[in-house]
Image: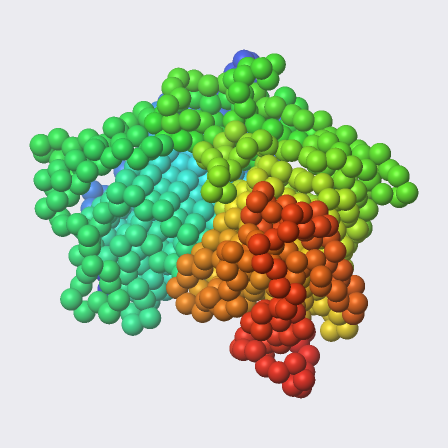
Amino acid sequence: MKNKIICGAAALLLPTIALADPPKISTRLPQQDPTTKCYQISNIGELYGFAALVEEGIDGAEKDPTACGVLTKDIVVNKNLLTASGDVNEENDFISWIPIHNFKGSFHGAGHTISGLYLNGNEYQKAGLFANIYGNVVIDSLGIVDSYFNNTNVGGTTGSFVGLMEEHSSLSMNECYNEASINSKAAAAGLVGEAYEYTNINMNGSHNSGNIISTSAGGLVGHTQGNLRVTNSYNTGNVYVTTGYVGGIASYVYDNAYIANSYNTGDITSQKGDAACIVGYIKKFAHLINVYSSGNLSAPNQHGAAKSFFNGFNVSVEIVNAFSAHVCPASEIDCDKPNATPEEIADGTIYKKFISSNYEGVDASVWKQGESDTHPTLSKGTAASLTLDTKGGELGYILNYYVPGITSPLPSATRKGYIFTGWSESEDASAAKFTTLDHKATGAKILYANWMEQKAPAVKNDCYQIGTVPELYAFATIVNEGLGDIERNMSACGELTDDIVINKNILDSANQLIGDGSNLVAWNPIGDARLISGVDSVMYSGTFNGHGHTVSGIYVNRTALEDAGLFGWVRNGSIDSVNVRDSYLRAFEYGGGIASRAEGTSRISNSSFIGEIDVGYHAGGIVGTAGKFDPEDEGITIANVYAKGNIKGDSYTGGIVGVGLDTKIINAYVIADIKSSEKTGAYFGYSRYSETKNVFQASLCLTGSESECEDLKTSWKEFEDGTVAQLLHDFKDEENSVDGSIWGQALKKDPSPVFIGEIMEAPLAITKKILPSINPSRIHVLDLKGRRVNKAANVGRYFTKFGK
């Protein structure tokens, strides 16, 4: 019986093969090197012994899931398992491989191979050399060859190296390759089958040449809910799936997909789902630099799509030097046209484009193509050793190598009572600090963590007195998780006693980030626990008074996480008299200059933001999203505020509030460049049952659709000459407890109103009469479709519950 893996509409799942009982293995504990503490594995018995050590202990040695193993020879589990055509050789009796479960250590191939791994049946839900991994795991310099994984377990995930990465785990994989045939009932890939949430995969110099059949699969990595970074790697195997996503490099990436100097030449097919040459589907962020594909591409079902690089909707994309010379079947319904030809792949045209690339941060010199090569290939041995000394802390994820020529983000670290401020090359922290290793770096590196000790602020009248950077970070930690003997307090009261500068001069005169932020200290918002393992989401419900002080240099760069702002999630809280300056806020979703989210009866007043906001969904100059939590809540009040700078988002982007539900904006203004693909507005990006009173704007909206930025626009002259300042200053709203006397302006100095309480020097022309288009007594009530309706109209009540 033949069991050849084929790629096409007629491809079938491989049947289970019944074989005679295999020979028994003499399992024993490998010797442990006294210096490296790694177990030295030289034969099949020691490989199985290492597996036993990890799972249950062996020969008097206790169970050790964190064990380190290193091969000293090629290991042969079964000889001649596959025929030359890729079929299983039925003439032999095979020893079955039992995947290693719950591995948390490191495994070094040292340039050797493991051959003859054989798994056939439904006994294991997770299949591979390692069934599943936890924590921080290193696998490097290893090849899996002449092997066969046929996982018929419904829901089973399969990868030749790792079947499944558990939540909050990370994998550093360098110079690994697979030549095994793989078949799976669920997520599968040549190297890593599936990764759960909050995972990080760093993969370099690796490849797959084995054919894969599954319901969802990628050439190198299958379905990942976390971050994926692939450099100098490739797939040549054919990948066929029956219903789900399929890609030459990965099938699905939820968070951030960074793929550079990589390629696919295998045929990619999804019988009933979406297919793409590089990644089947990307949810959030895509960076594709110096990549190409030359394999055939097909998604023949009418509901499937075949894309050159990836499928996705509203994905933040960076594509540089990406080429596809795929061939679409004539009957294909939704198939991208290629942007390169097979001839250009073969004759060196694409290779020349790569090596002439001057994209900073990605060195293209690893590419090569000789006269006999039919396509560009990659040089080997591209990584350098990296040692990260946390000095008592814990790494956010593991990374034991970096790639010279490619800018390499470094993991953050955590330590109780301290704030991580970056890495340096000197142990005494005298050298420059950074969070990204420059592409010009060469040679083995030892980097040392730098820490800032948190100091709990003094307490006065039951309120924390905050006047320094360590005290501000300590207050955030008290709210989010507790600090030392101080228990977590989500309703803590805080007051600023001085201006606070976290990072100096991080934006240019156009309010845009200077550099890549690699030398900046990161901020985690007050009311946020998304980076704190084991802590649920935190909603701030306290009272915070800035007393007119500023917090500047806030840097939040969460490309795959939610919530960017001085405050994160605020529920029934009060924030007053806080001014954020020179700050950069980036997140996948929810971002605001003061708070990312405001719920219930929260109030934000007498506050301002000047800086840059770059958030995928729900971005606002003051609040990302605002609305009721309980039907009886009065809603959100945002009064006496202003926002200036750059506000960018993919959708639901507003100058003051991204999404407002039962939200009032009173006595405010915005002057900003607002950019969004859809649902954009000067005040609200999107709103229902929300109101504006005495609000002004002179913003520029760049949007694909649904823009309201031109409505009620105020002239620059009225901002500069004090007209708007006077209107704001004279405004009073007793019902909502709003007094505009805080507003003022130093004419010929301040280009727009500020919080100084008076207008200095007589403006050129001030009228006490407010223009009809900006009448402060007019309240705009919006219906379910965002249209203005008469205030007296019976619009009913709207209730929404935010959060997860």
Vertical placement of 209 versus 39: above or below? below
**Residue 766 x/y as whole percent:** 61, 60
Vertical placement of 57 versus 42: above or below? below
Number of labelled discs?
0
Q: Is 270 left, or right, of 480 in this rendering?
A: left
Q: Quadrant of residue 336?
A: bottom left
In-front residue for pair 202/715:
715
Q: Examine the rendering and report whether any part of residue 173 can be seen.
A: yes
Single out the residue that lies furthest toward the right.
Answer: 461
**Residue 20 x/y as whole percent:** 37, 47
Vertical placement of 633 versus 611: above or below? below
In-front residue for pair 538/694:
694
In which quadrant will I find the N terminus?
bottom left
**Residue 41 x/y as whole percent:** 45, 24
In-front residue for pair 370/144:
370
Residue drawn at x 28%, y 40% as measured from the top left: 290
Residue drawn at x 64%, y 51% as measured from the top left: 762
Residue drawn at x 41%, y 67% as measured from the top left: 705
